[in-house]
Image (spheres, rainbow, N blue to C red):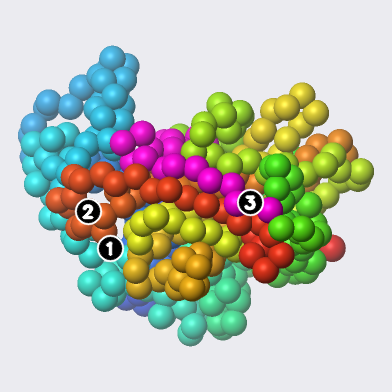
Amino acid sequence: NGRMGTFGGSYMGFTQWALASTKPPHLKAMAVALSTSVRAYSWYPGGSLALEVIIPWDAGATQFNKQANGDPTTDISPEGIERRMAELKAGFDHLPLGEVIHRLTGVDLPLYRDQLAHGGAGDAFWDPVNFRPLLAEWTVPTLLVDGWHDYPLPGVVEDYAVLRAAPAPVHLRIGAGGHLGGGGEGGMTDASLDWFDTWLLAREGLLGPTPVKVHVQGQGEHWRDLPDWPPRSEPTRWYLHAEGHLAPMPPEAPSEPDRYRYDPADPTPSMGGIGMLTGGTVDNRPLETRPDVLVYTSDELGEPLELVGPVEAELHVASSLDHTDFFVRVCDVSPDGRSVNVCDGLQRFDPASIRRNPDGTFTAAVALWPVGHTFATGHRLRVQVSSGAHPVYARNLGTGEPPATATTLRAAEQAVYHEPGRPSWVTLPHFSG
């Protein structure tokens, strides 16, 4: 009938935006999954480098090009794949970063050099692959699909925020998984086919009653229809307290800060979360025993607590360095002690972004990934604070040297405050229906 729809996830999701920017006349519907309209968005989370996204992608693209040119050297046997994964893990830890893709593939990839040289999604170098400015006047009905533990998710909900004010109908669907699980949607076929049947074949009654549908994790996992994103909620501060306590009331008495040492020679590792290869939900207890991870835990909940919406943290901190990171994670702690990650985020700081008080402290604002999770009665909320999650976020070497050539490692002495006048908190969206 001369009507075309486009579908795809991850890089193929981004290519839809590139294709759609040419405004083909037959394009009448899009289903974009696991991707945003800003190509560079997912490379620089929190101002860091997403090594677990950049290195596997760039190495894989290089190997694909070699195969396309007749090079049969890629071993796709189980043993070959296992060996390749070990090589990737070694690549995450190699310094300087500028050598990694050549060490893995024998090829110098211009894209990789550009990614290291032009850090930040807002760098004008990436403007040609930023299609978000087009979305304000978008006219093509668009379905956005992602998962709570996928690295592009904040960019996806930003796309939705622009599109909902545009002429085009837009729906947002957030599943329970990470990148490799299709955002919890598997092949993502059902929702996308209903979208195409609606807009290409004019079939009625296939779409939900509201534009947003999310899969709430935790107790009694369920899908929830929402009239918009973010949904109506009560943003509630949960404060860090002395002796590792977390509570929804601010601290009332002076206390000593909690201190730890972040050493990039032994970086705090990533466990679960938004990693492309290692993301998702895992038991965080091994991570929480490390001396470079602070843990704050609430009392047992007397009733279920459903969180749906954006999450942010504000820490009062001190650091011995001017180049440092702060990582914040929310976990669900069950009665047996299992601590499962719910959402997290990292923010990189440098002399331009640190505003020190006269006593040397500063405020560290960290945007976490959105949340959709119900904490059961008897469970506890937990907040982790650390200074890294390598290699999902590249370790901060502490020097501010260019990432392509930096090899010097400097450890940071960190302090997190939790007293009147210097409180630290995480703001959680208590869902109100």
* Residue 367 x, y percent position in the rendering: 55, 62
Q: Nearer the viewer, mark 2 or mark 1?
A: 2
Identify the magenta region: 255-277
* Residue 214 x, y percent position in the rendering: 69, 54
Q: Is residue 221 above or below residue 193?
A: above
The amino acid pointed to by label 3 is Glu
Marks counted in the figure total: 3
Point out the tag, 3 or 1, that comes first from the N-terminus: 1
Q: Which residue is mark 2?
A: 403
Which residue is nearer to you in this view: 143 or 46?
A: 46
Q: Is residue 67 above or below residue 318?
A: above
Q: CA distance from mark 3 to mark 1?
A: 36 Å
CB contact under 8 Å: marks 2 and 1: yes
Residue at figure coordinates x 58%, y 60% from the top left: 315
Point out the tag, 2 or 1, that comes first from the N-terminus: 1
Q: Is residue 181 above or below residue 145?
A: above
* Residue 348 x, y percent position in the rendering: 41, 59
For the C terminus, which image quadrant?
bottom right
Magenta segment's dominant SS is loop
Residue at figure coordinates x 46%, y 71% from the top left: 356
Q: Is residue 262 magenta?
A: yes
Residue at figure coordinates x 41%, y 43% from the top left: 262
Q: Which residue is mark 1?
A: 119
- The quarter holding residue 366 reads bottom right
The amino acid pointed to by label 2 is Pro
The amino acid pointed to by label 1 is Gly
Point out the tag, 3 or 2, that comes first from the N-terminus: 3
Q: Secondary structure at mark 3?
A: loop
Residue 178, visible in the rendered structure? no
Question: Which mark, residue 256?
Answer: 3
